[in-house]
Amino acid sequence: MKREEILLVYDRECPACNVYCQVVKIRESVGHLRIVDARENSEVLHEITAKGLDIDQGVVLKMGDQLYYGSDAIHTLALIGSRSGILNRINYWVFRSKTMSSILYPFLRFLRNFLLKILGKSKINNLEIKGNDKF
């Protein structure tokens, strides 16, 4: 039986996001997690863009035909996540609550954007908004 492929789309140039995405694991019974760099041209990025989701402002989790964005993505990831390892347990305990995820996510996004600004990174700007190149 083939396990469902679940896609986690994020900005690999963000050091904090990269560490998180490399550490987070999902339960084997749920499927296979494939990490996708949003800075690379991919079918899923085209799908995200077609839905009007700004990848610079939120991570995306794709399960089947469903896209989860931002706080919904990290909440869903926590629910399907493995409980092995201290970081995965912390992820579960912090983000298992939809309310807590929606409260914490904007703060984490602010810190991420600030970090990328300090590092001089450019935005992905998948929605091709004029003048939206820098953090």
Image (tube, helix red, strand yellow):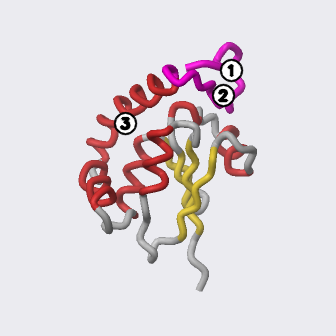
User: Which residue is denoted by mark 3 in the rendering?
Assistant: 105
Q: Amino acid at mark 1?
A: Ile
On screen, residue 51 above or below 93: above
Residue type marked 3: Tyr
Give the answer, above or below, for where 41 lies relative to 81: above
Residue extent of the magenta highlight? 117-135
Q: Which residue is mark 2?
A: 125
Q: Secondary structure at mark 2?
A: loop
Dot 1 crowding, Cα within 10 Å, few <14, some 14–19, many 20+: few
Label whose residue precedes the other's in the sequence (3 or 2): 3
The reply to whether discs 2 and 1 touch (Cβ–Cβ < 8 Å) is yes
Q: What is the spatial separation of the Cα atoms under label 3 and label 2, in whole angstroms?
A: 20 Å
Q: Quadrant of residue 130?
A: top right
Residue 128 position within the rendered picture, expressed as x and y whole percent measured from the top left: 72, 25
Graded by Cα atoms within 10 Å as few (under 14), some (14 to 19) or many (20 or more), the crowding at tag 3 reads: some
Residue where numbered disc 1 is placed: 129
The residue drawn where x is 59% and y is 63% is 64
Give yes or no for residue 118 being in the magenta stretch.
Answer: yes
Main SS of the magenta segment?
Answer: loop
User: Looking at the image, is mark 1 or mark 3 earlier in the sequence?
Assistant: 3
Q: Quadrant of residue 12?
A: top right
Residue drawn at point x = 48 percent, y = 51 percent = 21
Q: Please, what is the three-letter code of the amino acid marked with disc 2?
A: Asn
Q: Position of residue 1 (x, y in %)?
A: 59, 86
Q: Residue at x 65, y 20 (%)?
A: 133
